[in-house]
Amino acid sequence: MRFYPGSSMVSFMSEFLENKTKEDDYNPVGMNTGGEVADFSEKHFSVANKTHRFFHSQPVAAPAIILLTSIIVFGLIVGDRFFHPYNFSLILQQVTIIGILAVAQTLVIMTAGIDLSVGAIMVISSVVMGRLAVDFGFPPVLAIIVGLFVGAFFGGLNGFFIVRFKMPPMIVTLGTWNIIYALNIWYSNSETIRSGDVRDIAPLLQWTGNSFNFLGGRLTFGSILMVIIFVVVWYALNWTPWGRHVYATGDDPEAAALTGIRTDRILMSVYILAGVICAFCGWVIIGRIGAISPASGTTANLDSITAVVIGGTSFFGGRGSIYGALFGALIVGVFRNGLALAGLDVLWQEFTVGALIIIAVAVDQWIRRVGS
Amino acid sequence: MILQPIIKAQGLVKHYGRVVALDHADLELYPGEVLGVIGDNGAGKSTLINRLMGEDQVNAGEILLENKPVSFKNPMEAREAGIETVYQNLAVSPALSISDNMYLGREIRIAGILGKVFRMLDKKTMQQQAREKLSDLGLLTIQNINQAIETLSGGQRQRIAIARATAFNSKLVIMDEPTAALGVKESKLVINLIKDVREQGMPVILISHNMPQVFEVSDRIQILRLGKSVAVVKPETHSMSEAVSIMTGALDPNDHEAGAYCSPHNGN
């Protein structure tokens, strides 16, 4: 009855609807164990209590409801301009970068960690891809592969300090954020590779920015890549032993270790995978901007955390889902877009996002309270 | 017929620096029995048990599992050899489901390329088997095996953990303070469950501070004192206060009429 991360979106919706009936299925039997331990009857539960139980069992319900509501509200305020397919594809393009980084961030936060270096890894990967392909004439495919390895390396570096020296992830990634940023300036000579140069020499790097018509909107290959990354990570988290072990490690590392899970390896794999995903995002950001700049994506770090938090993934680890991150990124995207179309100043967009974070965490804490 | 112990530890020695945690401790567990292990704090209970389940290395001594010497480097190896442990903290992941928890660390993957290459979980089989195993033990008729562990009560969680320990061809189950965190009513359930496990022929090592419970459920009780196995007593021959006296050193077990070592399954 809790929204079990393994089920698909479809079964999520149906479970959503059946929630009430399933609730009553649980039937504790005392037979040869003598006497009831738990009484699951719901007679005396108030409305608030039932709501609480519902959101507790369906962690993605809250962000899903917020997303739908915000789309409806902005549709009513802004009107047709908001509902235009082109606008939706614009929102999608705007959330692509944050969406991909949010996948990486979700994986890390799921293990009760945090990765402040996702933006930096993304940028250095894109700079490496660009330098190799444009300045040193590497074949673009090779440049991209090397860029992905760079992402894996820095992710692995984070994992190494966190696993080996038991350092808090926030401190480690705060450090590597600065280190990578400095290396990035050094390696790029703080020069931007111009969009025209990229187009002439290594157009493959900008492929992620190419778009095609889709139901009246324009879809970029970068957005497609984002969807693919979401699906792959969703599968890995929910349909492989590795995914179960990530959840278990985040939930209670000691308990996970006692069941034989090698939590160190799981953590290491999570940080490396997060690094690779950030590097993919580095490729996507080249397509989005066109040029390759060491100064791009400066707000991406915190935006990715924002998306994850709004998506209902718990900072305490073990709870959350990958589509929560997608919803979170979309909620931020819809709010920014809707507020802009409604004619509000950018500063009110920031204000709203800030308010959303606080509301999301407040709701999250309320939802997490077990057995109240 | 000479009864062979399932597991036999002899002459285990463990130092932590200059502190001697185990001083030639022995332990024998026979088929179908519940062996209680008691001792004051620091008597070596945890060290002895940690060794059996491969969490700790000893300085000397050997362990025989079904007469074959074994040496486990980690709990995984011990588990693969058939030594299951129910930990004090249960080692369950609250946010994961019942079936996920039962198969944590030994997930079943789908046969064929999906399982081999894509490492896809066989959720259907796991859920089905988890349900069967729970009902085999007469534990719970759970309809929703995908229910998160955190929605269960402490006693229910405990029983899931015990089900997990007994469900996978294990040879013996070690229970480390299984009732420490439970109330009276739930403790009672767990004690009954230990009896059920024994009924099924599965031997159990029970470590507990709760003397009445140990005396209620154990066939034999091993008493540790200062890292030594000073006595193995039976609830029929020794009273609880005698056991405590041996534990604290007030009574020399050899002075007791039943002697310092009670062999299994004699008399009754």
Image (cartoon, grey):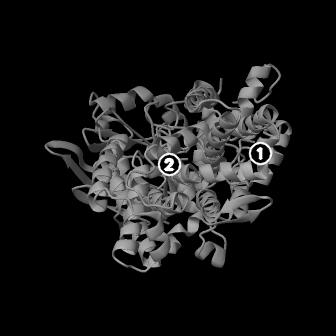
Q: Which residue is mark 1?
A: B141
Where residue B217 sits, quadrant-wise, is top right
Residue at mark 2: A105
Give the chain letter at badge 2: A
Q: Quadrant for residue A42, please give it.
A: top right
* Amino acid type for the residue under numbered disc 2: Gln
Q: Position of residue B245 (x, y in %)?
A: 33, 28
Q: Secondary structure under badge 2?
A: helix
- Numbered mark located on residue A310 in the image: none
Q: Position of residue A311 (x, y in %)?
A: 62, 41
* Residue located 62% across and 35% down the image: B155
Q: Which residue appears at 47% of the width and 30% of the height?
A: B210
**Which is nearer the eye, A56 or B234?**
A56
Mark 2 vs mark 1: in front: 2
Q: Is residue A217 above or below residue A248?
A: below
Distance (Cα) linking label 2 and label 1 = 39 Å
Does residue A47 lie above or below B253 as drawn? above
Q: Which residue is at a point 53% across and 48% down the rendered structure image?
A: A106
